[in-house]
Amino acid sequence: MKRNRFPTGWDEARVQSVLQHYEQQTEDEAVAEDEAAFRLRGQTAVLVPKRLVPEVTRLIEARRSRR
């Protein structure tokens, strides 16, 4: 049997909590949450080709670990 691995700080309970949040969210609530994310200061949204997502993620994590 394959063992599930979670990122640091995550476990089955946290995953289930996040799933429940999004499965119970109305469409209006989802839109409001998305719009709020785009208003965060100090952050931006960028469209990245799917094939580059792993590399972008590695770059972000490398920068975070240097702080």
Image (tube, grey):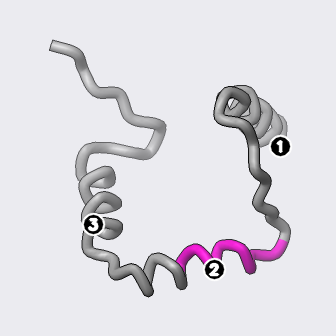
| Tally of numbered discs | 3
- Dominant SS in magenta: helix
Residue of label 2: 35
Q: Position of residue 9 (x, y in %)?
A: 44, 45
| SS label for mark 1 | loop
| Quarter location, residue 24 | bottom left
**Measured along the vertical axis of the image, is residue 52 above or below residue 10?**
above
Q: Over which residues does the magenta segment extend?
A: 33-41
On whether residue 36 falls in the magenta region, the answer is yes
Q: Position of residue 13 (x, y in %)?
A: 24, 52
Toward the left, the furthest residue is 1
**Measured along the vertical axis of the image, is residue 34 above or below residue 49?**
below
| Quarter location, residue 37 | bottom right
Q: Which residue occupies the foreground of this view, 29 or 2?
A: 29
**Mark 3 touches mark 1? (CB < 8 Å):** no
Label 1 CA crowd tier, 10 Å (few <14, some 14–19, many 20+)? few
The three-letter code of the residue at mark 3 reads: Glu
Q: Quadrant of the C terminus?
A: top right
Disc 2 to disc 3, C-alpha distance: 18 Å
**Measured along the vertical axis of the image, is residue 14 above or below residue 63?**
below
Residue of label 3: 23
The three-letter code of the residue at mark 2 reads: Glu
The three-letter code of the residue at mark 1 reads: Arg
Of labels 2 and 1, earlier in sequence is: 2
Of labels 3 and 1, earlier in sequence is: 3
Residue of label 1: 67
Report the residue at 31% width, 50% height from top: 15
Q: Which residue occupies the foreground of this view, 48 or 61?
A: 48
Q: Which residue occupies the foreground of this view, 9 or 24?
A: 24
Disc 2 to disc 1, C-alpha distance: 29 Å
Disc 3 to disc 1, C-alpha distance: 35 Å
